[in-house]
Image (cartoon, grey):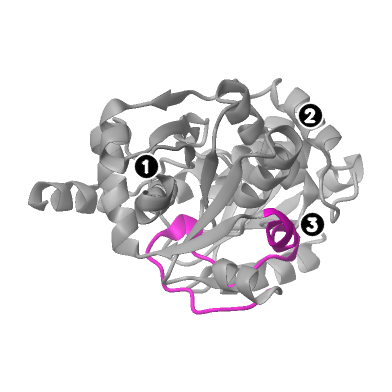
Amino acid sequence: MNTTAIPTLDDIQAAQRLLALYLPPTPMWSYPSLDAATGARVAVKLENVQPVGVFKVRGGLNLVANLSATDRKRGVVAYSTGNHAQSIAYAAAQLGVPCVIVMPENPNPIKAASVRALGAELVEHGPTFDEASAYAVSLAERRGMYLVSAANDARILAGVATLYVEMLEKQPDLDVIVVPVGSGTGAAAACLVTRALAPGCRVIAVQSSASPAGHDSWHAGHCVTRPNRTRVEGIATGSGFELTQQIMRELLADFVLVLDDDIAAAQRMMLRTAHTLPEGAGAASLAGVLALADELSGLHVGVVCTGGNASEDEIRACLRADRLA
């Protein structure tokens, strides 16, 4: 596979066959109380039950499994606020590949502990994702290791796309899929799958207004950098990614911004109505559904609980706000 090309349906199906060796399909459920709260018919794909609690494990496994023998021996370096880090660390552990993860300073302790438990070396550098990524580039060069992109790799996209194949196999009549955006792998993958399997299904992306680089890149027609101030760490990026933006520019139906407080409210709603506690990024798609309530009323809408790696502080804040609501 050309790692910088847009993956084909054949690439996605190959990833599905590979991932079947490691991961069972995740559940997808509907909840009457959630439908009543949103005005739509909402189906929730529960990726928070993955081995490392996040959808990104699909892309990590597909990438590492498809490395050359030489690159596996060199080992891999990845950079992340935590979820992509866990996915690469998990894949490296499964396949016996040396792994170094670079995360911003003071990372989510649950995600950091998971990376260490998986046997990866964890390096903390810089206050934000962007500083961590720059350091990872130099570290990979110094150590002669393979640098894993956060998004600009067709193997990651093909792996993530298997999630949306599962969604449409379970609910082929979805009208809309709403997807949170950090690096954009989920939204880009959803676009590729719906084009191939359900061309009448629209894909709508959601991002925090406090870190709008993906949204602004899509509207500008080229990748831009923006302040990265969201407290929702799973979607905290300060620049667009070329491969995912290229796909979204062609195929994405819409892209909306929501407040961090809107995401927190959706997190509480998911706790009450879907009986699951997502991390903030895992509730961002529901925040998008609520922001577009009039447009989506009565439609069959798919959302992904992309991850469940909420820190203890995040859980306390969610529960405290729920009591005050």
Specify the amino acid type for callout 3. Answer: Met
Disc 3 or disc 1, which is closer to the eye?
1
Q: Which mark is residue 171?
A: none
Q: Measuring 46% from the left and 67% from the top, which residue is drawn there?
A: 105
Q: Measuring 40% from the left and 59% from the top, which residue is drawn there?
A: 232
Count how many numbered circles sit on residues in the image: 3
Disc 3 or disc 2, which is closer to the eye?
2
**Viewport quadrant of the N terminus:** top right
Specify the amino acid type for callout 2. Answer: Gln
Q: Measuring 65% from the left and 36% from the top, which residue is drawn there?
A: 58
Q: Nearer the viewer, residue 54 or 203?
A: 203
Q: Position of residue 154 (x, y in %)?
A: 79, 49
In the picture provided, is 153 more to the left or to the right than 88?
A: right
- The residue beneath circle 2 is 13
Q: Under tag 3, what secondary structure?
A: loop
Q: Position of residue 182 (x, y in %)?
A: 55, 59
Q: Position of residue 9 (x, y in %)?
A: 81, 36
Of pointers 3 and 1, the one earlier in the residue sequence: 3
Q: Under tag 1, what secondary structure?
A: loop
Quarter-of-image position of residue 44: top left
Q: Is residue 2 covered in magenta?
A: no
Of pointers 3 and 2, the one earlier in the residue sequence: 2
Q: Which mark is residue 145?
A: 3
Q: Which residues are magenta?
A: 223-251
Confirm or deny contact between disc 1 and disc 2 (CB under 8 A): no
Q: Is residue 235 covered in magenta?
A: yes
User: From where the camera sits, is residue 253 visible?
Assistant: yes
Specify the amino acid type for callout 1. Answer: Pro
- How crowded pointer 1 is (Cα within 10 Å; few <14, some 14-19, many 20+) is rated as many
Of pointers 1 and 2, the one earlier in the residue sequence: 2
Q: Which mark is residue 278?
A: 1
- How crowded pointer 2 is (Cα within 10 Å; few <14, some 14-19, many 20+) is rated as some
